[in-house]
Amino acid sequence: MEEMIRIENLVFDYMRDEDQEQVSAIKGVSLTVEKGSFTAVIGRNGSGKSTLAKNINALLLPSSGVVYVNGYDTAKEEYIWEVRQSAAMVFQNPDNQIVSSIVEDDVAFGPENLGIAPEEIRQRVDRSLKDVNMYQHRKKAPHLLSGGQKQRVAIAGAIAMRPECIVFDEPTAMLDPKGRGEVMSIIRELHEEGITVVLITHFMEEAAQADRIIIMDQGEIALDGTPRQVFSNVEAIRNMDLDVPLPVELCHRLRTRGIDIPETIINMEEMVEFLCQYK
C-alpha cells in the first residue's frame, strides 16, 4: 500500500509556562499511515496524541526527526500549502475553525486560499455541504447552529479543499450523543469514499470503528494494532488509566468468572451473538 504519512523518530519539545522547564510531548515516535486507511489515536490527557496530530498538519514542527505527508517534508516552508491541502484538519471546538459570518462563505475559505477558480469553488462548497447534510443551512450565520451542526460545517470546510487525508482532533468531544453519532457517521462515509482518516479521540467506542488503533502514553506509542489486537490487552490499557469499550469490559469480566468467551469480541452485537449460542 502507498504511504500517506511517514513519521521518523519524531521528537517535539516545548517550554512549560509556569517554570520554563523543557518538556518532551513526543519522544522518538516512528510510524506510517497508509492511504485510504482509518487510524484512531487514543490516550489520556497529556499523552501526546493532539501534539502528534498537529505535527501531521504542520501546525507544529518537529524538534527533531521528520514528518512526511504525501511525500512532503512538513518542516520545509515551501511545502506548507501542499501539506495542508493533502492533510486537512478538523479541531475539537468548531468555533476555533469557523471564520466567516455565513456558512457557505466559511466553507469557501479554504479553496479560496488555494487559488481555486470561483466556479470550481461554488461546486465544491455545494457538494461539501450536501455531503454533511448542511446544504439547507448554507445561508445561515454559524452562531445560530447547534454544536453538531457547526462541527459538520467545519468538516465541510475540510472536504472542500479536496484533501487525501483528514485529521480529526477530538471532533466529538464537545458534542452530545446525537451530535457525536452524526459526526462519526460522516467520518465513516469519508473513509468509505477513500479518504485517509486519522481520528484523535478519547471515546473507545469511536476508536473501535477504525481499522487500526494507536495508544499513546507519555509521548510514546504504547500499543499499535487492529481494534481486536489492541483491546485484547485490557489490563495494559487500564494501567494507562484508560477504559475499554463496554462490550470488551463485560467480556473480560465474564472470562474472569470462567466463561470461555473469545478475546476478539469488541462490540455489543458480537457479544450478544456469542452469548445466545453459549451453552
Image (spheres, grey):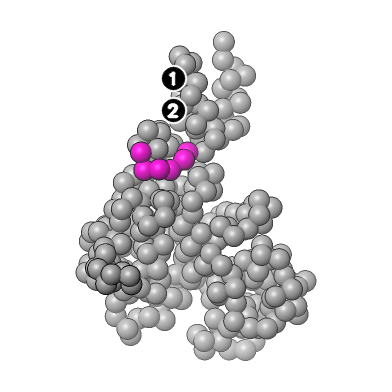
Q: Which amino acid does label 1 sit on?
A: Thr
Q: Distance between the residues labelled 1 and 2?
A: 12 Å
Name the spot of residue 111 as percent of width and height, x first. 55, 82
Residue plotted at (51% across, 38% down): 245
257 w.r.t. 96: above or below: above
Answer yes or no: is residue 276 visible.
Answer: yes
- Reply above or below: 239 against 185: above
The kind of secondary structure the magenta stretch mainly shows is: loop
For residue 256, the mark is 1
Q: Quadrant of the C terminus?
A: top right
State the extent of the magenta-drawn residues as a range.
239-244
80 left or right, relative to 134:
left
Q: Nearer the viewer, mark 1 or mark 2?
A: 1
Q: Is residue 44 above or below residue 137?
A: above
Q: Residue at 26% x, 64% y: name it.
A: 23
Instruction: Judge from the rendering whether residue 188 lies leftward or rightward of residue 240; answer left or right.
Output: right
Is tag 1's residue or tag 2's residue first in the polypeptide sequence? 1
In front here: 193 or 190? 190
**Residue drawn at the location 31% of the way across and 46% of the way down:** 222
Residue 241 inside the magenta-drawn segment? yes
Q: Position of residue 109 (x, y in %)?
A: 58, 83
Question: Which type of secondary structure does the marked residue at label 2 adopt?
Answer: loop
